[in-house]
Image (tube, rainbow, N blue to C red):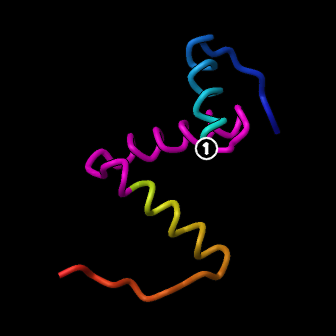
Amino acid sequence: MSTAIRISEKLIYEARLISKVKKRSLTGQIEYWAQIGKIAEENPDLPYHLIKEILIGLEELDHGETTAYQFES
C-alpha cells in the first residue's frame, strides 16, 4: 500500500541526483534513506558503513549467498 506524502523540493532534487548514480528509482532512493535513518535511530552506536554491510549481508542471505566470514587479524 502506498501513501502520498509531501517532502521538500530540496530533498527530491538531492534524491533524484543520487538515485541516478545508485541506479535506483526516486522512490527507491527515498525509501533507502528512510530505512537507513530508521536503523540509525534504533541503533545509535552503529556507524553507517556497518549498517550498510549488515543490510548487504541480509540481502545475500535472502538469496542463498553465504560464505564463512574471515576475521582480519
Q: Which residue is mark 1?
A: 22
In this picture, residue 53 sits left or right of residue 56 = left
The part of the chain drawn in magenta is: 23-50
Q: Quadrant of residue 69?
A: bottom left
Front residue (pair 43, 32): 32
Q: Quadrant of residue 44?
A: top left
Residue 12 in percent (x, y) is at 63, 19
Q: Amino acid at mark 1?
A: Lys
In percent of width and height, residue 13 lies at 61, 18
Q: Secondary structure at mark 1?
A: helix
| Residue 16 x/y as whole percent | 65, 26
Q: Is residue 29 magenta?
A: yes
Spot the residue most to the left.
Answer: 73
User: In the rendered image, which quarter contains the N terminus?
Assistant: top right
- With 42 as the anchor, is 15 left or right in this view? right
Q: Is residue 24 above or below residue 30?
A: below
Q: Residue at x 59, y 76 (%)?
A: 61
- Write the residue at 70% across / 32% down: 26
Q: Main secondary structure of the magenta part?
A: helix
Name the foreground residue: 32 vs 38.
Answer: 32
